[in-house]
Amino acid sequence: MRPSEAQICETFVGQYPSRMRTLKLPRRRWAVTTAVAVVSALSCAPAFADYSIVAVSDRGYDVGVAIAGCDKNEIAHKPVLVPAVGAAVANTTENKDSHAAFLYGLRTSTVPGNYLEEVPVSGNGTHSFAMAKIKKGTAVLAKNGGSSTTPTAVDAQATFVVSGDNLASPAVSAAAVKAYKATAGNLAQKLVAALAAAEKAGGDAACSGKASAAALLMAKPNDAIFNVYEFLPKADFTKELVPINDKHLPRVFVSALTTDGSSAVTKVTDALEKADFTKPVHIRKNAAADQASLLKFALLCFGGATAAIVLILLYRRRVMTAEAETAGRSRRSGNPAKR
């Protein structure tokens, strides 16, 4: 198995300083060498790839994506869904241009396998894309050295595709395929079953068995097109979240992020087990956001309590000043002050 990007980076960063210590370089060269090492170390920060199941219904016109990975931010913004047509996702780097290309490919009559070659990429990293279209089939493509793992078998209608750039083993995609085909229910239920099976089989090799971020999106024929870069063109999704009450959300939108080592896939699975699919299902399970909200609430409470104490002290000071003035006047007039 090829070493992961994180392993290569760890090896380089771990070995390079030791070599630097053994070299006797002039002061100026030391500065240049140190700068190169720092830049290299920063560039080696692990960029986790995701794994996904992109699917279209074989009994209707529902489309959806389930995705998971070791990301430190939510990943619900990565899929593109065109109701009654198809869906696509970037398992690795995504941006405004790739989403626009996905949208064009889904809206036209292009076969996914022919179109993914045209999706633009930037930089020298790995890029992994997957697409499924109703009555047009599925496709997955890796660019710039990617090694996406695709299922060895899908249903005859080719209505779903499993992919990921850094799957732990071929057993991951095989488990997802088996769970998807064996699960009864709607498309969302089949997708989450496949995602859970993929994680149980190893998921992303960098995740140590548990994904920190996961999302499941499913659109009904009458839903709006879901492409975050159209209705949130200036959003920075390393800092911002897709609004849970946005009118552009598909019928099912579940996003989870964990910070304690627990599984985000399990959070999504648990949320959908209790879901009422007769109405929109919009759920967010974000530990980081919850902690931030709790901290904000605590700070507001602290601020309110502090303000109340200050007001009480100011009032008390005013009362004491008034009493002192009254007592002074009473002494000057020869009458005892009444309290």
Image (spheres, rainbow, N blue to C red):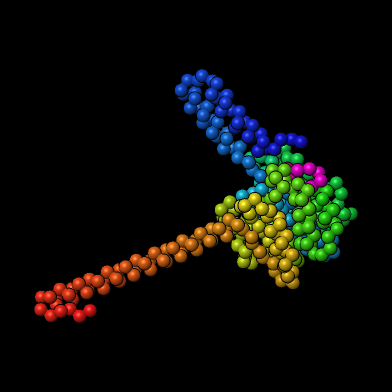
Q: Position of residue 52 (x, y in %)?
A: 74, 51
Seen at 60% across and 31% down, the residue is 14
> Is 217 included in the stretch rendered in magenta?
no
Seen at 49% across and 23% down, the residue is 29
Could you say which is closer to the camera, residue 9 or residue 102?
9
Seen at 36% across and 67% down, the residue is 309
Q: Position of residue 77 (x, y in %)?
A: 65, 55
Image quadrant in which you'd find residue 217: bottom right
How many numbered tags mark residues here? 0
Q: Quadrant of the N terminus?
A: top right
Q: Position of residue 294 (x, y in %)?
A: 53, 61
On the question of residue 12 being in view, the answer is yes
Q: Is residue 143 above or below residue 227?
A: above
Magenta region: 164-172
Q: Quadrant of the C terminus?
A: bottom left
On the question of residue 219 being in view, the answer is no
- On the rendered structure, is 179 left or right of 205? right
Q: Position of residue 92 (x, y in %)?
A: 68, 46
Could you say which is closer to the camera, residue 280 or residue 173?
173
Seen at 55% across and 31% down, the residue is 37
Image quadrant in which you'd find residue 330: bottom left
